[in-house]
Image (cartoon, rainbow, N blue to C red):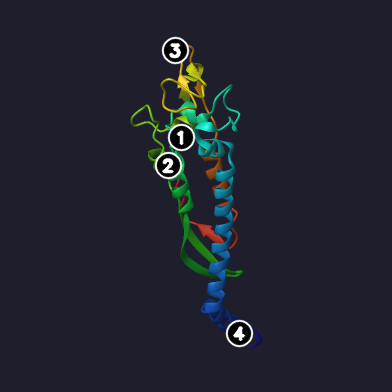
């Protein structure tokens, strides 16, 4: 009889916990706060990245990223003075959110399942057009096969012609490509932080 009473008591307690709005709301808040911490870290890493800093400073920036022997990325990629090449990237990343789907009550409490809504790399490539190559993405090329004509880049503060005052293309024939790890490592770090969230299981992987 004691075993039966213990089982009945345990079942009653579990049922009470399972339907407790206070516990349910608390669980959701814990999961959402973990996501907010991971997302805040992503945005902080993005905003403090040398490539971000350099491109946001525009035509007058120094080569914060240390990627060029002279000049800066803004001019090398070929942006116009006044352009903000990262505006749409920042907007898309900032809109990331978590969607909590279901909950299951187990031996150690609630287990939540969730999905994350964040732009795919393809979406980020679409909002980063390479100024002088229709249909190409400077972000995709920068992290992939590289942006060509590094050897032809020549820095000047007052070019007679060219896309920005940060640089023009010289007539030299020597080539070369520029590659920089940028957005992908940030998203991979974000992915790792999401996977380390406790009390929840992710059911989607939306950006790779």
Is 79 left or right of 17, judged from the image as shown? Answer: left
Q: CA distance from mark 4 to mark 2?
A: 54 Å
Work out whether mark 4 precedes mark 2 in sequence or the reverse, and give the earlier one.
4
Circle 2 residue? 124
Labels 2 and 1 touching (C-beta < 8 A):
yes
Residue sitting nearer the eye, 163 or 6: 163
Numbered disc in front, either 1 or 4: 1
In space, the residues marked 2 and 1 are separated at their CA atoms by 8 Å
Residue under label 1: 139
At 47% from the left and 27% from the top, the residue drawn is 165
Q: Which residue is the site of mark 3?
A: 171
* Crowd tier of the residue under label 1, counting other residues whose Cα lies within 10 Å: few below 14, some 14–19, many 20 or above: many
Please tell me which residue is depicted at 54% across the width and 31% down the height of the picture. 180
Percent x, y for residue 203?
A: 47, 56
Q: Secondary structure at mark 4?
A: helix
| Camera-side mark, 2 or 3 | 3
Question: Residue 134, relative to residue 2: is it above or below?
Answer: above
Residue farthest along the left direction in this orientation: 134
> What residue sits right under mark 4 in the picture?
9
SS class, disc 2: helix
Which-is-in-front pick, marks 3 and 1?
Answer: 3
What residue appears at the point 41 percent right and 27 percent down from the top-left corner?
Answer: 163
First reached walking from the N terminus: tag 2 or tag 1 = 2
Q: Quadrant of the N terminus?
A: bottom right
The answer to whether any part of residue 208 appears in the image is no
Whether pointer 4 and pointer 3 mark residues with C-beta atoms closer than 8 Å, the reply is no
Q: 10 Å neighbourhood of mark 3: few (<14), some, or many (≥20)?
A: few
Structural distance between the alpha carbons of marks 4 and 3: 84 Å
């Amino acid at each position: 009889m004691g075993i039966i009473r213990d089982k009945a008591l345990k079942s009653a307690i579990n049922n009470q916990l399972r339907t407790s709005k206070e516990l349910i709301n608390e669980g959701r808040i814990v999961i959402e706060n973990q996501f907010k911490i991971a997302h805040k870290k992503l945005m902080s890493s993005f905003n403090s990245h040398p490539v971000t800093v350099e491109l946001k400073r525009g035509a007058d920036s120094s080569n914060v990223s240390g990627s060029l022997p002279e000049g800066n990325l803004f001019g090398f990629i070929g942006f116009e003075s006044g352009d903000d090449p990262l505006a749409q990237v920042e907007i898309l990343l900032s809109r990331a959110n978590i969607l909590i789907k279901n909950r299951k009550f187990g031996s150690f409490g609630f287990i939540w399942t969730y999905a994350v809504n964040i732009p795919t790399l393809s979406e980020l490539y679409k909002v980063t057009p390479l100024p002088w190559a229709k249909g190409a993405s400077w972000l995709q090329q920068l992290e992939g096969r590289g942006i060509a004509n590094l050897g032809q880049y020549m820095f000047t503060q007052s070019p007679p012609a060219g896309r920005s005052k940060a640089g023009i293309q010289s007539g030299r024939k020597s080539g070369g490509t520029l590659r920089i790890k940028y957005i992908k490592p940030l998203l991979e770090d974000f992915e790792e932080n999401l996977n380390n969230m406790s009390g929840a299981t992710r059911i989607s992987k939306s950006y790779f």
